[in-house]
Amino acid sequence: MLPKRLLCAAALCLCFTGTGVLAQTAAPAEAPMATPSMAPSPEPADEPGMEASAPEAPALPAAQPPMTPPTPAAQAPAPMPAAAAPTPPAAPMTGPVRNIVLVHGAFVDGSSWNGVVAKLQQKGYHVSSVQNPLTSLADDVAATRRVLARQDGPTMLVGHSWGGVVITEAGANAPNVAGLVYIAAIAPDLHESTQDLMKRAQPMPAAQATIPDASGFLWLDRTKYHADFAADVPENLTRVLATAQVPIAAKAFSETVSHVAWREKPSWYVLTTKDRAVSPDVEKFMADRMGAKIVPMASSHLAPVSHAGAIADVIDRAARELSRQQ
């Protein structure tokens, strides 16, 4: 029996030995299942001539360009300050012309428009009469602009005599001024003064009747007010006007304009053919130069008083023409 037991024992040993060999040969096939906790293999940095470095970050896909940090919203370029940005010119107003602003001249005040105001109001217009201080061109322009700022909608700006200089300056760059009407008025060009224009003719009688005072203001001689300024106005009325006259600063006649409204606005000109204050020839020169529509009128210089109805009609026709063009 002994030899048989020895053979069995030998067979069992061979079986155990085969199992261990099979286990060792199967181990390499399980290597890909190793977890990150496994010990890393020696780094190439330990080799001579190599530098140690941190583990590399995952590479971006080949088609994707390198990313740059997005600019935070707070770091976006700030908008240009309002003061530095160019201001676009104001667009002109549109619609019918229903506002009329009247600007008087020297040696009268706003009441010289009373007859014209009444006629225009009867026609349905909103009318305003500026009270010029007559202390300087800048002061009169400022007074006119205050009244213009109160107008709601397109406006016709009207100037008589010295008031023409005022509307030439005040009406420029004014989007609510649709057009201009000059009545026996001074209409200077850029950097031109009243004196510059009056020199184009012989001195007129009214100019020779002015009297300067110690404060630098000019008054019109009361005794010559009717003949040289308002010959077709009843004398009883001219006596009142002469008494209430507003003097003008002498320096105003030498002040020049820095803006010219008639170069950008349609204009009308009432040329007074019997004028003894502003030469009709000079009036014709100014009206032609500005390309105004000329309306001759056989009147003295104070046409707003002597021909109030006719002056109101001219203003009305001009406003209607501009309204049709809107």
Image (cartoon, rainbow, N blue to C red):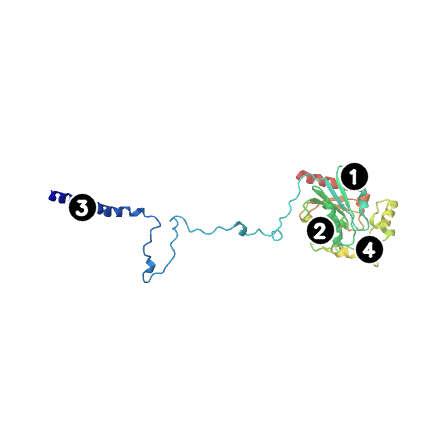
Tell whether 241 sits left or right of 89. right
**Image location of residue 40, percent across then percent down:** 33, 53
At numbered mark 3, what does the secondary structure look like: helix, strand or loop? helix
Sequence order check: which comes first, mark 1 or mark 4?
Answer: 1
At numbered mark 2, what does the secondary structure look like: helix, strand or loop? helix
Q: Which of the numbered marks, if any, corresponds to residue 169?
A: 2
Q: Residue at x 20, y 45 (%)?
A: 16
From the image, tell me which residue sits under label 1: 119
> Disc 3 marks which amino acid?
Cys
Sequence order check: which comes first, mark 4 or mark 3?
Answer: 3
**Image location of residue 226, percent across then percent down:** 85, 48
From the image, tell me which residue sits under label 4: 218
From the image, tell me which residue sits under label 3: 13
> Disc 2 marks which amino acid?
Glu
At numbered mark 1, what does the secondary structure look like: helix, strand or loop? helix
Mark 1 to mark 4: distance in Å?
31 Å
**Image location of residue 90, percent across then percent down:** 64, 46
The answer to which quarter of the image holds residue 233 is: top right
Q: Residue furthest front?
A: 1
Crowding near pointer 4: few (<14 within 10 Å), some, many (20+)? Answer: many
The answer to which quarter of the image holds residue 152 is: top right
Mark 4 to mark 2: distance in Å?
22 Å
Query: Toward the viewer: 258 or 224?
Result: 258
